[in-house]
Amino acid sequence: MGYTLEKLDVYQLAELFGDEIWEIVMGWDHFKKDTIGKQIVKSSDSISANIAEGYGRFYYKESKQFYFYSRESIQETKSWLGKCKRSKIIKEDKCDVLLQKAETILVKLNAFIKFISKSSKHNPK
């Protein structure tokens, strides 16, 4: 079988990461959910969503733009996690684990962007 989005490691990690953020936020009170919660859920879900949208594009130039959006969402999520850590909304050790997961996704996404930039599908001659 060929390559599919669902088999892509960085996509799988991003999906799991977004699900983990959702699970955490669902345990918060209304105020926290309505303020930081909505923001961090949107940014963390946007990581995998933009990978998916980029994956659906034919040319690298189009795909790359969505992968860059995904990178921006990783950075935004890390910012919200920092806020959660400073505000003691999420325990410091849990925030550190989540920040490391976000960094791992970022590294893998950058490697994926580099890999596809060399693909003939994305660089027609």
Image (cartoon, rainbow, N blue to C red):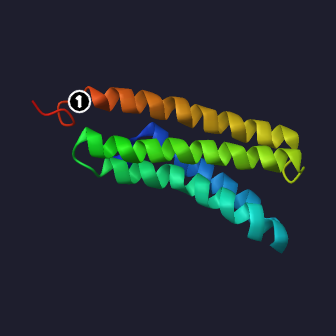
Residue 29 seen in the figure:
no
Query: Is residue 38 shown left or right of residue 92?
Result: left
Q: Residue at x 27, y 39 (%)?
A: 60
Residue 7 on image: x %, y %? 39, 43
| Residue ID for mark 1 | 119
Under tag 1, what secondary structure? Answer: loop
Residue 64 seen in the figure:
yes
Quarter assignment of residue 120: top left
Residue 70 on image: x %, y %? 49, 46
Residue 87 on image: x %, y %? 88, 51
> Where, quadrant-wise, is the C terminus in this rendering?
top left
Mark 1: amino acid: Ser
Quarter assignment of residue 94: top right
Query: Is residue 72 shown left or right of residue 65?
Result: right
Q: Residue at x 35, y 48 (%)?
A: 54
Q: Residue at x 82, y 74 (%)?
A: 30
> Where, quadrant-wise, is the N terminus in this rendering?
top left
Query: Is residue 113 shown left or right of residue 38?
Result: left
